[in-house]
Amino acid sequence: MFNSKTKQMFANHQSLLSPATRIVGDLYFSGDLYLEGSLKGNIYAEEGKSAKLIVAESSVVEGEIHAPNIVINGKVYGAIYSTKHIELAAKAMVEGAIHYHLIEMVKGSHLVGQLVCTGFGVDSDASADVKEEAKVIVKGDVRPIVKIEPKADIKPEAKMNVSQ
């Protein structure tokens, strides 16, 4: 019934939801999840385990996404929470806040919402240098419409007076 490649794929905790799949309700997963269908609900990766979500070009997600590693190439309407790495690929269209540790935005991706940098953790004994080290990587000519919110415990730089 299953060939050896299919058995190996499921043994490595990889899941595929085809373009014909439509889910209404929350989805919980571990391992890798490749989503080609549509989902109206929230997506949660199992805490403490390695997980990666790939939202394909044909996908539409209406709800929150919580996963360490995320690649978006489809449409997402809702907040995204990534504790490690998120990539907005060329066909990505996101409406909602993105909470990220490290974000990559490829030319052609669209974002209407907020970028919220979560940094390297919320440990009170961590130095400010480490907390400010979260990065945004932009590839190509990306023009997102965003509002960037700094972490509450990082003080903004002093305002400069410009005189003529």
Image (cartoon, helix red, strand yellow):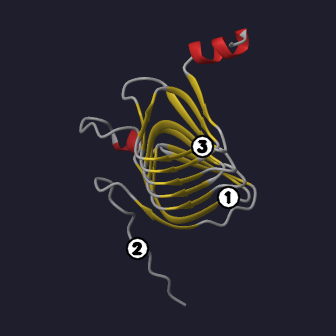
Picture quadrant of residue 17 = top right
Looking at the rendered structure, the kind of residue marked 2 is Lys
Residue at left offset 75%, top offset 56%: 140
Decide: few, some or many residues near mark 2? Use Cα within 10 Å; few <14, some 14-19, many ≥20.
few
Spot the residue most to the top: 4
Residue 15 x, y percent position in the rendering: 58, 28
In whole angstroms, how far apart are the C-alphas of marks 3 and 1? Answer: 24 Å
Q: Which element is circle 1 on? A: loop
- How many marks the image carries: the answer is 3
Decide: few, some or many residues near mark 1? Use Cα within 10 Å; few <14, some 14-19, many ≥20.
many
Is residue 131 or residue 141 the one in the foreground? 141
- Where 23 falls versus 125 (above or below)? below
Looking at the rendered structure, the kind of residue marked 3 is Thr
- Residue 135, numbered circle: none
Q: Which element is circle 2 on? A: loop
Left/right of residue 25 with respect to residue 6 in the rendered view = left
Reading the image, the residue beneath label 3 is: 21
Looking at the rendered structure, the kind of residue marked 1 is Ser
Reading the image, the residue beneath label 2 is: 159
N-term-proximal mark, 3 vs 2: 3
Residue 89 x, y percent position in the rendering: 68, 49
Picture quadrant of residue 54 = top right
Closer mark to the observer between disc 3 and disc 1: 3
Decide: few, some or many residues near mark 3? Use Cα within 10 Å; few <14, some 14-19, many ≥20.
few
Q: Which quadrant, please, contains the C terminus?
A: bottom right
Q: Which quadrant, please, contains the N terminus?
A: top right
- Where 138 falls versus 86 (above or below)? below
Reading the image, the residue beneath label 1 is: 109
Residue at left offset 72%, top offset 11%: 3
Left/right of residue 35 with respect to residue 42 in the rendered view = right
In whole angstroms, how far apart are the C-alphas of marks 1 and 2? Answer: 32 Å
- Where 63 falls versus 6 (above or below)? below
